[in-house]
Image: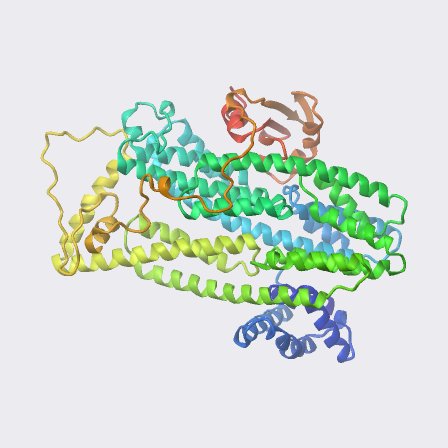
Amino acid sequence: MTGGALHRLPVQMLGDLVSPRALERILQDAAQARGTSIEQLEVQVLEDILKREVFKRLQLSVPAPLAKKRVSEVLNELMKTTQERQLPTPTISSLVGLEDGARRFTLYFDWPETQRLRGVLSVAKQEEKEGRDIAALVLEGQNLIEVMDRRLREGLVEQAQDLAELKATFARVQGMGGREVRRLDTLIGQIDEAQQQGTLLPGEVERARNITFNLRKLLESSVVQTVENVDTAEIPTSATILDPDAQARVLALEQEHAAQQLGKLDREFTALLDARPDLRAQHDALRSLQHGNQLTADTVENWREQLKFERTTLLAEQQTQLMRLESALSGVATGADMRIALDSARHLLDIGSLATDELQELRTMQESLRAGVNAQAQLATQRELLDIERSGRNVAGASAELAPLLAQARAALAQGQEPDIATLWSLLERRMGAAAQEREDFDARADRVVQEYDTVRSLAGETTQKLGRLADTLRAQRRLGRMSAQARERYEQTLHDAEALLAEAHAEYRAAQEVTATFGQDALSGLLDVFDFEEATDTNLFAAAPDPSAAPLPPVNITPSNTGQVAPSASSLFDTLLSSITPGGATPASAPVAGASASTPAPTGFPTSFSLPDTTAPSQEAVETWLFQGGQIQHGPQDTAAQGMAALLAQASALGLQRLDMNDAAHVWSARSSAPGEWRLGRAVTWTALDERVGPWLDTGEG
């Protein structure tokens, strides 16, 4: 095995503790000290470097036990790699290999890394034809593919969690019947198939979530029991429900859904929030509302419209900036880096994505060219500053701490002074070390939850079932290895939710044991029968109502000697048993209270209003459709954007896909294929309009 492949292993596995650039330097210096080069490292030499220089360097960032553990993991992987004569992940060592690796991510054309890789490949092909060395370009391409591979794996873990929750909800609402339930069943099937194929379908997940949200509101509000046709039922809200218990349940659903929508906005507008610290501060203020159970769907929707407006404005500004930079750089000899940055910026802006980093890179090149004799040195420093800035985005708290220091460094460089790069790397690596220690703590907590779940999994009930789904998610998150900032945040949230459920499950388990010890197994079985019966009546929505004149079931009283007494709930065994051991009948902390948000002040910094245009109702939005056959538009307007979809649909057909959901800066797109070479394509401003107006036609070709 070549050393060129070997030395990448520690860089990949330890890049979350020390910057990859620093690790490369350590390996290079250590190799030179041993009379060789980093590309020629043998296994035994690399092992010695890991145990000495790398281990010593890691201890500057993390405690010695953690440094030893992580080095041991690399040594074990190195041994396995040597035995198998291949790296644990596919290694791309040529331009052909880069193209093969990039093909896996063709569908995710809106990812910035995809467009950057496209530019790298284009320039690398040209450089190779002209006989120049493309090793640096191949290395950048490898790094981009590693980032996209990690992003895909993280997305699949999140999609699997969403799929499990959707299936659990479908089991509850299946008895309702109706068009929306059938649509939900279809969407779940499509997501399930995509998950098995390792493909992300965010559009389908979002639509399935919206459907389950409305169906659950119908179910929890009991509105569905008063109508003959679920499809004609008016969707209730917490403000229109009079029953306090039903109102509290629906309010909890609304807050949960609003939190999901806010999280989606964080992912959808990450580039905008990174480019605009003021918008990030407002977004964080909304998250404070979420934690205080004050977030509403209207607030999130208004924020979405504001972000779309701000993104459109910034896109126009960046397009103008690019034109100016292209004009300023047109008279100079363009190197590979400049061509990649220009190509990436053009493609990103063309598809409606921001190109903040690429434009920053082009500006640094322009400034470096003005520096004259020190141009190359200044360009190298500017790139290192940009590398620090990008790396900081994936480390909790690093971006905020680095921002003023990076601004000072760039100002010093502009004045011809040499900035203190080492201090910036030191700060970043200190944060990386703290994040790595936190990740160790997360993993330990995940292991504890999974192990303790096994002690209570025999209990039947919604609490234990949901805990089981979260335990599966924790196992998958635990296996991810290095994580992005977004994946780490989801990991933390999953832990928080799972630990809360675990505490409830333990309480349920203790209560069940106490009932058995006090009254015997028959009493517990009888109690379970009562709840099985009542749970069945909840889901059998159209069954005949019980006769009011019939004799009621005898009351069930469970009063252990050392606890208070609270009336049992009929929703689950846990609610009944936990209420019996809650002193003084205290309300559990997790229980939603109707109207709680009215008296709680909004946090400082929360945007109290948004200056937005009125939104258009879905029934009034413009919706356009096309029919493609053999890569050509057979029906529909000869729109430039639609014509550009032909190549993408052909690629989807080649991959065996039958459904695509996409969005650009102004529209959402959905395409379906039910026959080889034939695609139905729809476009609208919102998913709601697209679903309501042409959803049936897209699904079946009829209507």
Q: On the picture, is 34 further left or further right than 88?
A: right
Q: Is residue 503 visible?
A: yes
Q: Relative to 103, is 242 above or below?
A: above
Identify which residue is drawn at 74% across, 45% down.
Answer: 344
Q: Residue at 39%, 61% (x, y): give it.
A: 449
Is 544 displayed left or right of 347 in the figure? left
Which quadrant of the figure has residue 388? Answer: bottom right
195 vs 450, left or right, is right
Q: Position of residue 437 (x, y in %)?
A: 52, 67
Q: Position of residue 590 (x, y in %)?
A: 33, 49
Q: Is residue 7 visible?
A: no
Count all numbered tags in the image, as a single digit.
Answer: 0
Q: Residue at x 76, y 37 (%)?
A: 320
Return the x and y of residue 469 as percentages of the image width and height: 40, 51
Q: Is residue 413 above or below residue 176?
A: below
Q: Is 544 rendered above or below residue 577?
A: above
Residue 275: give x, y in percent of width and height.
Answer: 65, 46
Q: Please tell me in which quadrant of the rendered image residue 502 appears.
A: bottom left
Quadrant position of the N terminus in the picture? bottom right
Please name the residue shown 62% across and 31% down the image: 666
Give the quadrant of residue 515: bottom left
**300 vs 116, nearest the viewer:** 300
Q: How is the image coloured?
A: rainbow
